Structure formats: structure tokens, C-alpha cells
Amino acid sequence: MDREQYLPFYRRTQQQGEVESDSELSRKGYDERRFRDFVEDKIRDAQERGVFEHLPGMGKPLRLDENPYARDKELAYHLLKSNGFAPQEIELAREIRCELQQADARLARLRERRQRLAGRRVPPFPSEKRAFNAALAQALRDYEATLRELNRKILTLSLMVPPAMHMNMVDVDSKVKAFRESCPPFPI
């Protein structure tokens, strides 16, 4: 029985000497060193002519779009990213931050309105005071509802993401109290 017939193919080729050496390849008309020199000469000539000087992205960091942690979701993440979207958890975190900023901005405008009314030479008329107090009460109700909804979204986010991405819950009562103290209603 021939022992060679049971050896894997790659071992048989090594033993039989079927691996071609550089000298054998060059005899057949293939010289790797000459080919490399030819390619390097072409690249050097193109550099001297300035072909590579105005390429898009020149001098900018490489865009490495591969995500080694995506695994089976890589195609979905690529599609989302190339179309201007992000994964659901990233979109939700962005939405939470945006809504909180909008709510705070609305309260800042209300504080500014109160300061303008209080800082006028002519004191605010009773109708202006009533209108401001009604707007303040409505803003406080909306602000509290918004903060409670944001806490619901933060809980949802915390269930979706790893602990490193968790967001702190908003302390609704202390935020509402702080706003009431910074912007009290006008006495009528």
C-alpha cells in the first residue's frame, strides 16, 4: 500500500517538489522583482507628474466604516448610516437630548418675557399679568408632562443599550421647583 496516497494534497506537493522556485518562475518568463520595479516606476512617474496631488480626501483622516462589533447587523448599520440614519437606540438618545433642550429653551423664553415685562418703565397691565401667568401655568404643565415622557423614553433606552450608554433619569419635581423659583408668577 502506498503511504503517499493518504497524505493531504499540500504535503504531497511539498514532498514531490512541485513547489516552483523563483528561478523556475523567472525561466518561464515571470520575474516578480522586475514586475515590482515596473509598478514602482509607474507610481513614481505619476507622483512626479502630480497625479496624486488633488485626490478627494487628501490630507484628511481615513474613513474606516467597518464596525468589528456589528457582526450580523453590519449590513443594516451600513444601510442606515449611508442614508443618514442611526440605529434605534442612537436615534432615541438623540431625540431625548433634543426634546430636553427644546423644553429648556421654551422656559428660557418665558423667563426672558417675564424679565422684559418686569423691567419696563410702565408696570405691566393687569391683563398682561394674567396672560403671562396663564402662559406660565400652561408651560409648567407642559414642562412636567414632557419631563415625565422623557423619563419613560430614558427607561426604554436603558433597556436597549449596555450600561455604559445609560442616561440618568430626570428629577421632574426638582426641575419644576427650580423653574417656579426662577420665574414666579406676577401678583395680580
Image (cartoon, grey):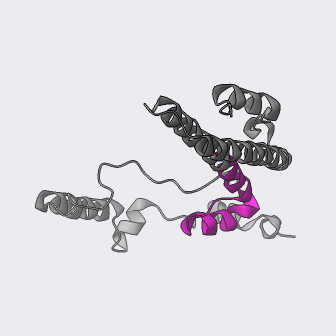
The residue located at (54%, 57%) in the rendering is 65
* Total count of labels: 0
Residue stretch rendered in magenta on the structure = 70-97
- x, y percent for residue 166: 77, 38
The residue located at (43%, 31%) in the rendering is 121
- x, y percent for residue 10: 68, 64
Q: Which picture quadrant has residue 143?
A: top right
- x, y percent for residue 124: 54, 37
Query: In which quadrant of the rendered image does the N terminus lie?
Result: bottom right
Nearer-the-camera pick, 165 or 183: 183
Q: Residue furthest bottom?
A: 28
- Establish if 176 lies above or below 157: above
- Establish if 41 lies above or below 94: below
Query: In which quadrant of the rendered image does the C terminus lie?
Result: top right
Nearer-the-camera pick, 127 or 9: 127
Q: Which picture quadrant has residue 170?
A: top right
Q: Main secondary structure of the magenta part?
A: helix
The residue located at (30%, 61%) in the rendering is 56
The residue located at (15%, 61%) in the rendering is 45
Nearer-the-camera pick, 120 or 40: 120
**Does the magenta-highlighted stretch encompass residue 87?**
yes
- x, y percent for residue 181: 69, 25
